[in-house]
């Protein structure tokens, strides 16, 4: 789900001034400032995946591993890289189209708030700017027809650094919407495949991951403890 952040654009210039999000106070001053006065704001239509809260919490708590898995199952995401550089701090890159850092600001039972700073380039480099963004992920586990799903409502608050480019971005709203839909659609498809693999065959995925040289041992062990039974994977 953290990969949805690469779609950090919007079609609405509406100013928003919420003191909190879903009743959760945001202590970080810079995050509050972006939410209160974004250049652009965008709420993505609800996304649903087959899976439970345990799977969701594990994946969003391990962004580098989730990105590695998504790249394996969905080749269009091969250019994306997420690297952990500190506790709750990550770098994100999309082969020059997106480059920046992300910081986990707040976590509750159903909501995660991230702060981003970086550079975005698209539309054959016609649209290029630096800025800061807040990504809010509201999620919930639902049961329907005998199956368990995770639903998420991503929302972006984007502050573009240069006033001129902020004005241009608002004018290009319809075109930016197309860009958002394509990126979010691609990332949602990759995430759906990832959930299916983890939920459908966690032990087989573990054996496969154990052969990958780019997976950190600590991430592999965390996955084993989260999903592998004592009988299949040995004692925890």
Image: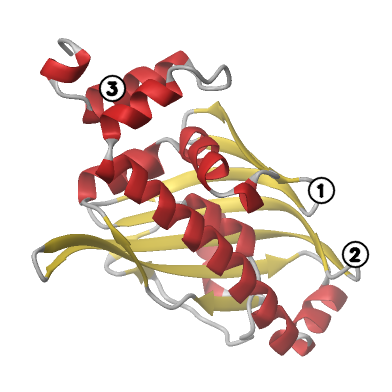
Mark 3–mark 1 Cα distance, whole angstroms, equals 34 Å
Quadrant location, the C terminus: top left
Task: Residue lying at the far left in this picture: please name it.
Answer: 146
**Image location (x, y in percent) of residue 47:** 38, 69
Residue 62, located in which quarter of the rendered image?
A: top left
Name the element at disc 1: loop
Give the left or right position of residue 43, taking residue 233 as reference: right
**Disc 3 target residue:** 224
Contact between marks 3 and 1 (CB within 8 A): the answer is: no
Pick out the residue farthest to the top. 235
Q: How far apart are marks 3 and 2 (CA)?
A: 42 Å
Sequence order check: which comes first, mark 2 or mark 1? Answer: 1
The answer to whether residue 5 is seen in the rendering is yes
State the residue in front, 11 or 49.
49
Residue 147, quarter of picture? bottom left
- In the drawing, what numbered circle is on residue 173? none
Q: Residue at x 28, y 37 (%)?
A: 201
- Picture coordinates of residue 26, whole percent (x, y): 40, 58
Local packing at callout 2 (Cα closer than 10 Å; few below 14, some 14-19, many 20+) is few
Identify whether 17 is placed above or below 94: below
Report which residue position mark 1 lands on.
96
Q: Residue at x 54, y 59 (%)?
A: 187
Residue at image coords 11%, 71%: 145
Residue 26, above or below 231: below
Other residues around mark 3 within 10 Å, as few (<14) / some (14–19) / many (≥20):
many
- Quarter of the picture containing the N terminus is bottom left
The first of marks 3 and 2 along the sequence is 2
Task: State left or right for residue 215 relative to residue 129.
Answer: left
Query: In the depicted view, which residue is nearer to us: 30 or 231?
Result: 231
Residue 186 relative to residue 119: left or right: left
Q: Which mark is residue 125?
A: 2
Residue 122 place in picture, x, y as percent? 81, 65
């Amino acid at each position: 789900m953290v990969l949805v952040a690469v779609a950090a654009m919007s079609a609405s210039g509406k100013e928003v001034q919420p003191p909190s999000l879903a009743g959760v106070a945001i202590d970080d001053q810079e995050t509050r400032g972006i939410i209160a006065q974004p250049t652009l704001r965008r709420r993505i239509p609800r996304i649903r995946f087959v899976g439970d809260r345990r799977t969701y919490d594990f994946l969003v708590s391990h962004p580098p591993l989730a990105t590695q898995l998504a790249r394996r199952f969905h080749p269009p995401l091969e250019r994306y890289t997420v690297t952990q550089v500190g506790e709750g701090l990550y770098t994100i890159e999309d082969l020059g189209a997106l480059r920046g850092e992300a910081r986990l600001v707040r976590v509750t039972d159903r909501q995660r708030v991230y702060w981003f700073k970086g550079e975005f380039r698209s539309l054959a480099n016609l649209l290029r700017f630096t800025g800061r963004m807040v990504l809010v992920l509201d999620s919930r586990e639902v049961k329907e027809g005998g199956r368990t799903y995770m639903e998420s409502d991503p929302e972006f608050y984007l502050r573009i650094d240069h006033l001129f480019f902020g004005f241009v971005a608002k004018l290009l709203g319809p075109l930016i919407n197309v860009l958002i839909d394509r990126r979010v659609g691609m990332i949602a498809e990759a995430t759906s495949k990832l959930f299916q693999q983890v939920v459908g065959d966690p032990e087989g995925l573990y054996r496969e991951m154990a052969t990958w040289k780019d997976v950190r041992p600590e991430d592999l062990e965390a996955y084993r403890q989260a999903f592998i039974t004592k009988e299949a994977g040995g004692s925890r």
